[in-house]
Amino acid sequence: MVELARESSGGRQALAFLRPSDTAAADVSLLDPDGRLSAGPEGLAGLEAWQGTGPDPRFDAALRSGASATLAPLLLLRVVQQDDGFLTEFLTCARTRTIGALFMRTGAHRHTEDADLATLVRTGLAGDPGLLRGTRGERTVRTQLEKGIEIEQKIDLLDDVSPWGVTRLLWSAVERGELPGFITDPGYELTRWYFYQWNFEGVSPDGDTAGHFSFGRAPDGSFVLKRKLFSEDRLRRAEHHERGLDLASDGLADYLHRTHPELRFRRLPDFERTRFDVNVYSLETGHSYGIETDEVVLTDIPGKTLRQVEIEYLESHLVHGLDASSVESETELLSSLVEQTLARHGLATRRGFYSKLSFLKDAVQEPVA
């Protein structure tokens, strides 16, 4: 057991990310299989308990020969003093990378100041079986709370700016701690995307917008249909993907008419889309978001370009005390932090829900076919 330096913040956390330097030992204790705690060897203070692929090699010299080969990040105890006593949060290791280790909250226990440390460790290790099982694999620790629903705010970039330059600006701001409470997704900090997209507007029998229907090609040459169903630009929109469609590019409209006979379709311009995502985690809630810088260029109408930063809810870690109701307010908070960051760098912006469908309709007005 390694005691770490005290944190400056005493608030509750759903997630914690420790870089190697964060694991420098203030003190080391040994916990035997019977639960007895004893003082650890001398000479380990200041050494990194986890250097990315293992503990500092000098642990070998202080511990029983070969013991460090079995060591791994397992459990992080955060002891928080509160008005009515103490709360220990148990965070179990959910991911290891050379850059550090990610822990997620799998339990919590209220106690007095004199609580036995060995007992607290045993309590943490015997926590919620379902949550603990989930931490054994990286694909079993997260879920999407509102499946089939996109939750997204948009910040329009009003100047002719480089999307990559904006991405670097925002990425650096997160890494410097300028978006308090948010960290980049360890090992998946940035993702890059490129799309060529065929676009249609779905129109209901009464003439109202029913949604944005768009096609893109998969690497195997098949088409993917993305349906976003909404009558007006807003925070939440239904979204569904249909993959593996064996279609010709001149047969896309026919496919829509066959599969959605209740709608009419307006053909809208194609566009090329370049997107850079800075993927972030909320330490407080365990929710995951994309800060996505987008540039959309119409292929057949010169000078028509849309640049935006989208703040999109992605998924949530299955942490103890997961609060689904906090997604909307936290999306609002993160959007405000991003907006403030852009303003500090002199970028002109407009915040709202302006969709790509609205951009396409504004770019060209044509009657329904």
Image: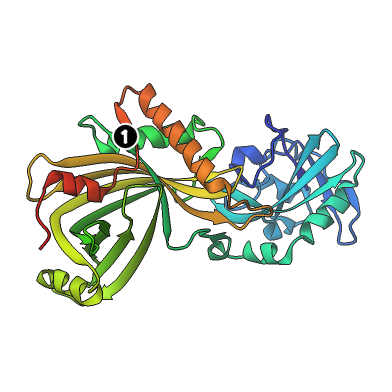
User: Height in image: 340 above or below 145?
Assistant: above
**Residue 332 in view (yes/no):** yes
Crowding at label 1, few (<14), some or many (≥20) Cα neighbours within 10 Å? many
* Residue 221 visible from this viewpoint: no
Residue 260 in the image: state x and y as whole percent. 25, 72
Residue 351 locus on image (x, y percent): 35, 35
Q: Residue at x 54, y 54 (%)?
A: 316
Classify 257 as above or below 327: below
Name the residue that disc number 1 marks.
166
Determine whether, in the image, residue 31 is placed left or right of residue 157. right
Q: Give residue 169's position: percent from left, percent from top.
A: 36, 32
The residue lying toward the viewer, choosing from 90 and 100, is 90
* 259 in relation to 106, above or below: below
Coloring applied to the structure: rainbow
108 to the left or right of 304: right
* Camera-nearest residue between 9 and 257: 257
Under circle 1, the secondary element is helix
Tally the marks.
1
